[in-house]
Image: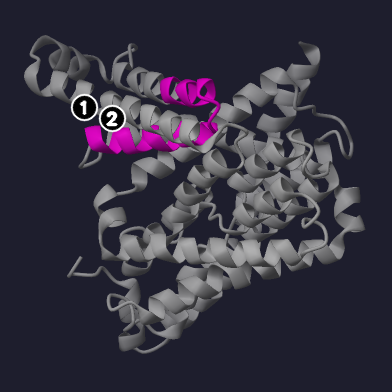
Amino acid sequence: METDLISLFCIVAVALFAPIISALVPNRMIPETVFLLIAGMVLGPNALAIAQPDAAITLLSDLGLGFLFLLAGYEINPQELTGKQGRHGLLTWVITFVIAMAICIAMPDFQSNQIGWLAAAIALTTTAFGTLVPILHERGLVGTRIGKAIFAYGTWGEIGPIIVIALILSTRKTWITLAILAAFTLIAIAAAVIPKRIWENGIHLPKFFKSNRDTNAQIVVRFVMVLLVGLVTVSALFDLDIVLGAFAAGFVLRFLVPDGNAGLEHKLNGIGYGFFVPLFFVVSGMAINPVAVTEYPLLLVVFIVALLVVRATPIYVALHVSRETRDMDPHSRATIALYCTAALPLVVAITNIAVNAGAMTADIASVLVAAGGITVFLMPLLASIALKRIKNASHANACPIEEDADE
């Protein structure tokens, strides 16, 4: 108990000071997530060993991951995923996965083990969409044309890897996994449709929710917690990654509140970003072994460069080819591609699966997690430089960051 409390105190203290330190950096060039990761690495078992990711802390971290993807899923408009730009995002992700497999097969650190190189390939196709959402809000990109493109391409960088993890990295037969995914989908649909029908056809329950949403009962927040923990639990029981359950909870919540609710969003942001999400990033930093990173500096650089080749380049080309975005200037396309290349949460999940399966060493996993953490800093930094060039350019070049009237 004492060890857990010490670890928790260190984490909440880091969570308090990280945004303060980030605000001291000119133009907020370094997101607070980077400081959370660094602090976790320094305080964790691989360095000072002041904080330990024990069972209780790990459970809170999993809830933080759940909140991160709940809030990310809530931000997504399902119609944008099924629209033209969303379909282009899906096709582009498939292309990135094919390229990633070819690269990882040729890499000596992964080619000796099938699950190892598959895990690395999946990691190369990820987008840290949940991590990007607060950064996009902070930089005023949500709702703009660039922001919508990041959502369309970046969302598939979360959903695609989640599905592939279940299908390829699972030890079950493929048809069993497909059946489990189908069952999970039905449960998620039921979690959306049943409350919707009750709300539309009921009399007393909707009235009770409205009258108690801002009282001590906080009934709406409690419902969201049941939704999140319920779908995360179902995904865990089905031996699926909990990210899938959390993402599904976000989609369900958006279905139930299609026009959004400022009061609910304020409360969820307070709970998530105030406690659970920063805790997840600090614990993720604890998984990084700085000694291992110094032993494989070339692999660290190669992985980041591979992310640019595998993820950023196809997205840039797709934006150039697509009829909806071909009128964008090169800086706008580069901004979108760079944001979509930031990777981290799923890299942690994927490497954990590979390490637990004996398909990847803990040192290699540390390097990949460190590389993912660097991209969370590096890619938004490069993207902000490209975005600044857009804003400093002529009005015609600045048009891509404005609202798109045709969408």
| Residue 159 in the image, given as x and y percentages of width and height | 45, 47
Q: Which mark is residue 172?
A: none
Does the image show residue 312?
Answer: yes
36 or 95: nearer the eye? 95
Q: Neighbour class for label 1 at 10 Å: few (<14), some, many (≥20)? A: some
From the viewer's perspective, tell me whether residue 374 is left or right of residue 73.
right
15 or 232: nearer the eye? 232
Q: Residue at x 77, y 57 (%)?
A: 111
The vertical placement of 350 against 157, above or below, is: above
Q: What span is in magenta?
A: 230-256
Q: Amino acid at mark 2?
A: Ile
Residue identified by numbered label 1: 193
The part of the image, by quadrant, that contains residue 142 is bottom left
Residue identified by numbered label 2: 189
From the viewer's perspective, tell me whether residue 166 is left or right of residue 366.
left
Q: Residue at x 75, y 47 (%)?
A: 38
User: Do residues under tags 1 and 2 come within 8 Å of each other at their CB atoms?
Assistant: yes
Q: Confirm whether the magenta stretch covers residue 300.
A: no
Q: Amino acid at mark 1?
A: Val
The vertical placement of 268 against 335, above or below, is: above
